[in-house]
């Protein structure tokens, strides 16, 4: 996938690059997000490895990673990526997403997903976009459901994690036939941040 920049009212999604290292560390430190065992947010010590892995996936055409820049402050407040791109079946996944604690439950996630989904359905011609999260990440499940995604099921004993834990993965998707309604809902929420709660 070709690197792109997606710009909205509240956020801009920029292609991840090496020069974002310290900004990523600062964003993850807002809430010490790496302490949540069910996330893959990099710690100060693992940020370079996290960044190297993301850029390697991009070089191998396995992912398109972004940083999330808050337009008002100019700060990097998180990261996300397209990955598991399946051109034959016209599907991809949006994931590896995390945000600084100070922007969680704001318009940031809503607009990020609106930008990513619009590009996926309207430019890439996807027929389905998938989201996956850890069984224990209840906040992520609620956030995905607020987008309008539907739960497909649970992949039990799906991933063996670096700490030895075996993760159950909850899978959601949005289909192209559902996109019009989902887009209208996300646009409404993005324009009225109070509707997020």
Image (spheres, rainbow, N blue to C red):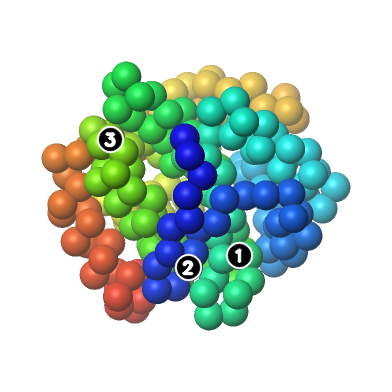
Work out whether residue 164 or residue 190 is closer to the camera in this orientation and state it: 190
Image mark for residue 126: 3
Taking the image as shown, residue 138 lies to the left or right of residue 77, namely: left
Work out whether residue 131 or residue 52 is closer to the camera in this orientation and state it: 52
Residue at the (53%, 34%) spot, across then down: 63
**Residue 150 in view in this figure:** no
Q: Is residue 97 above or below residue 49?
A: below
In the rendered image, which residue does mark 2 sit on? 11
Q: Position of residue 100 (x, y in %)?
A: 62, 64
Q: Position of residue 31 (x, y in %)?
A: 68, 64
Q: Nearer the viewer, mark 2 or mark 1?
A: 2
Residue at the (78%, 60%) spot, across then down: 22
Q: Residues within 10 Å of mark 2 (few under 14, many from 20)?
A: many
Image mark for residue 77: 1
Identify the secondary structure beneath mark 3.
loop
Marks 2/1 in contact by CB < 8 Å: the verdict is yes
Q: Which is nearer the N-term, disc 2 or disc 3?
A: 2
Image mark for residue 102: none
Quadrant showing the C terminus: bottom left
Q: Which is nearer the N-term, disc 1 or disc 3?
A: 1
Q: Which is nearer the N-term, disc 2 or disc 1?
A: 2
Residue farthest to the right, as pictured: 45
């Amino acid at each position: 996938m070709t690197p792109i920049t997606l710009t909205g009212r509240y956020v801009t999604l920029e292609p991840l690059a090496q020069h974002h290292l310290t900004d990523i560390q600062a964003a993850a430190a807002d809430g010490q997000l790496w302490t949540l065992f069910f996330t893959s947010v990099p710690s100060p010590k693992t940020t370079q490895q996290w960044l190297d892995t993301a850029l390697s996936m991009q070089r191998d055409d396995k992912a398109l990673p972004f940083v999330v820049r808050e337009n008002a402050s100019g700060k990097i407040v998180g990261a996300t990526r397209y990955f598991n791109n399946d051109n034959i079946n016209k599907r991809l996944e949006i994931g590896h997403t995390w945000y600084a604690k100070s922007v969680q439950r704001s318009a940031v996630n809503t607009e990020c997903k609106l930008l990513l989904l619009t590009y996926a359905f309207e430019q890439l011609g996807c027929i389905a976009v998938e989201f996956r999260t850890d069984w224990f990440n209840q906040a992520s499940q609620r956030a995905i459901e607020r987008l309008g995604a539907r739960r497909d099921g649970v992949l039990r004993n799906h991933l063996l994690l670096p700490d030895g834990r075996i993760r159950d993965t909850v899978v959601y998707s949005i289909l192209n036939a559902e996109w019009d309604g989902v887009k209208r809902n996300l646009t409404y929420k993005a324009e009225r941040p109070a509707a997020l709660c």
